[in-house]
Image: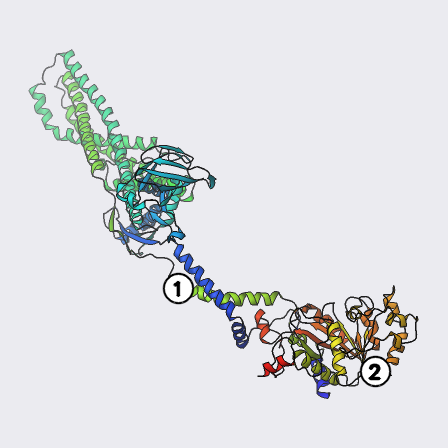
Amino acid sequence: MEDFNKKSEEQKNEKRPSAGMEGMLSLRETLDIFLYNWKWFLLSVLLCLLLTRMYMATKPSVYQRQAMMLVKDDAGSGNRRSAISNDALMQLNGVLAGSSVKNEVYILRSHQLMKEVAKSLHLNVSYTLNNNIWKGQIREVSLYDKKPFEVQFAKDDEQAYATFLVRIVNKQECQLSKFKIHGEKIDFTKTVKFGQMVKTPAGELTLIPDPTYLENFQDKVIKVTHLDIESAANSVGTRVTTSEVDRESSLVRLVCSDTNIKRADDILTGLLEAYKQSIIDDKNRVAQSTADFIDGRIKLISKELSDVEGDMADFKQRHNLIDLSQNAQNYLSQSSTARQRTTQLQAQQATVKYLIEYMKENSEGHTLIPVLSELADPAIQNQIAKHNDLMLQRNRLVENSGEESMTILEIDNNLKQMKQLIITSMEGRLASIDLQVRQALREEQQLYSSLSSVPQQEKHVLDIGRQQSIKETLYTYLLNKREETALQLAINEANIRIVEQPFGSSSPVGLNSSLALKVAFLFGLLLPFAVLYIYNLLNMNVRGRKDIETFTTIPVIGEIPHIKSGFDESKIMVFQHRNDNINEAFRLLRFNINFVKKDARVIMFTSTMSGEGKTFISRNFAASLTLMNKKVILIDTDIRKRTQTGLFNAKRREGLTSYLNGSTDNVDELIIQNSEDSHFDMMPAGVIPPNPAELLMSNRLEQLIEHLKEKYDYIIVDNVPALVVADAGIVNRIAELTIYVVRNRKLDRRYLPELEKLYQEHKFNNLSVLINDVFPEKENYRYGYRYGYGYGYGYGYGYGYGNEKEGKKKKK
């Protein structure tokens, strides 16, 4: 007994954790949980493996194909370092420049190119062989190059999103059914002939059969999906990725993932062709702009040349001039070199003026600058070429980014600076030509001054002839440039080279079946653990003896094992020669009382709330005491509910309340004598009074207990729950030992600090805790409990209760 009290004092001095604290699962607890719930773990693993296998079986196979492309620079090489050097030079001149390969990688994924691919391959209409589990077809199969028919819509934009089923009846007919327009089901079923236009909820359409594959799809159902071009382009964009191979080269990798290998190859091929054509179109726009400029100038020069020739004819006709004098011809031959130089310089002067006027007239537009290499020095020609390249890049990007994007605004600013720089250079070039023209004219003037002997008419003819020669030279030059431009339009090609045509493995990629099954197996093991762990966290009820000892310092006087549901609570479970769990538990309780309060004769049972088993325990504990040949009386002090009285089927109205209110002083007539089953006496509660609390406070209660002590060895008091009414505290004054019944898995664990407070403040005399409805130790692992020792007395008895024969069987 001293050891028991010493242990209680040590528990009082310990710092108690809060009722919400949790411990970590040990390896042994984890193993026990697994072993006890192995069926659930096995079921979870099998279910996860089955679901994963079913998902993999229904998931369409995805194939990955790729192609390789080389982006050439302006010099026709694929060396990226030279391109980087050019960009660095442009940045030194104040012009922003980006990586051309990165730009092309983005353009290859542009929505405009995806639209071109979707249009060319008719990807807005897809065909899928519907799955049929009953016929062994688990997954849907995408049909592309081996489809039995092709659906042609009268209007592609009509009912942009529509799906329907086509069942092939025979070689001439098919059945259309199960239409969905924007997700809305439409009841429409019709049998139509191949090649015949039919009006459906999805619009007017015609099914064109392919005899090569039609027979193979007899009586099969094919799902047809019709999208608008925009949605189809978006779908293609999600399947295609582009990236640089490395930073040192100009190689670009294109990858397409699709459920059909042929369609993936066609998408990559179509994307490369569309990209090449867009580059050629860009280059043709430069040449076409130059051709338009030349055509306009040819018309103007032709008119001017015609006017000069007309002036010459009119002058000769008016002055009757047929031929110039031989002297003039000889003299003028001396100045042919000077005149030829003047003519060439004036032709260049006129061309430069035309270009400057053209650039100023189109300074705010997004047009290209004509390329006339013979009329400008190489520096100006290089500036014009860079301007045109940046303008082409800007026009390609604006289709996807919009006029107001930051990239377009920066490019526009660069173009404006470059154009102003070209105009300045051209004006400088024009000033230089003007100086040369004036010098040539001065030389000619010196020659003309010596022609004083030449008739005035002949001088006028020479002037007109000079103008005519200038116009003819310029006209011939423009005709030659027009032919060169036309030739350039015919031979333009893209500055890319396809290094690798679409290639790849014929095996599907994506989900690794072995890895997926391993993950499913692991998830199947963790899922039950997670469920049990979460249940354990959310469960705030008391979970056995360890909870009581963890959160309170109240001594635990015993544990009553769990009894199978359906037992009769009114019957006594404790008998002389029975050795089952229930009897052993009450023997231990009877034995442990000697350590708490050896000489205690008045023992009170209470609990937190009703339903925790104090009535059942008080009855059987009283019966257990009678097995020691002790005289025992059980008093029902729950004068409000009278549960114990009802179990004894007491028909008399007199009881405890009759004595307390002074109706009688004869205690013996209030006692129900022991029966063959109970072997103890019982005092019923009596009539329910209007003032129970006041009645229990009467000093007659102490008188009754003193009187009963004279006749009985033990007085068992079945009291009301402590938290329901104040009666428990009132009656406790006569108790020598208070046993607080706590039902396992019912009492909220957060109440334990309040119970500890009652104990510390000595609100109940010699308070001890008795845990009811305790499961076997392994049973706790069914719910993943971390706390609770369970019970096990070392006898090998099973769980539940039974008769003596059952106990003997279990011992064997």
Q: Residue at x 52, y 72 (%)?
A: 34
Pinpoint residue 678: horizontal percent, then vertical percent: 76, 77
Earlier in the chain: of badge 2 and badge 1, it is: 1
Pinpoint residue 200: horizontal percent, then vertical percent: 41, 34
Pinpoint residue 178: horizontal percent, then vertical percent: 43, 41
Residue at the disc numbered 1? 515
Pinpoint residue 804: horizontal percent, then vertical percent: 65, 81
The local secondary structure at tag 2 comes to loop
The image quadrant where one finds the N terminus is bottom right
Decide if residue 262 is on the left or right side of residue 335: right
Q: Residue furthest left?
A: 326
The image quadrant where one finds the C terminus is bottom right
As drawn, 559 above or below 629: above
Q: Residue at x 65, y 79 (%)?
A: 803
Decide if residue 538 is on the left or right side of residue 595: left
The amino acid beneath tag 2 is Tyr
As drawn, 664 above or below 378: below
The amino acid beneath tag 1 is Leu
> Mark 2, residues whose alpha carbon is within 10 Å: few (<14), some, or many (≥20)?
some
Residue at the disc numbered 2? 712
Q: Nearer the viewer, residue 580 or 523?
A: 580
Tell me, for residue 253, which label it has, or none. Answer: none
Q: Nearer the viewer, residue 340 or 122?
A: 122
Q: Is residue 104 visible?
A: yes
Q: Residue at x 90, y 72 (%)?
A: 659
Q: Nearer the viewer, residue 571 or 451?
A: 571
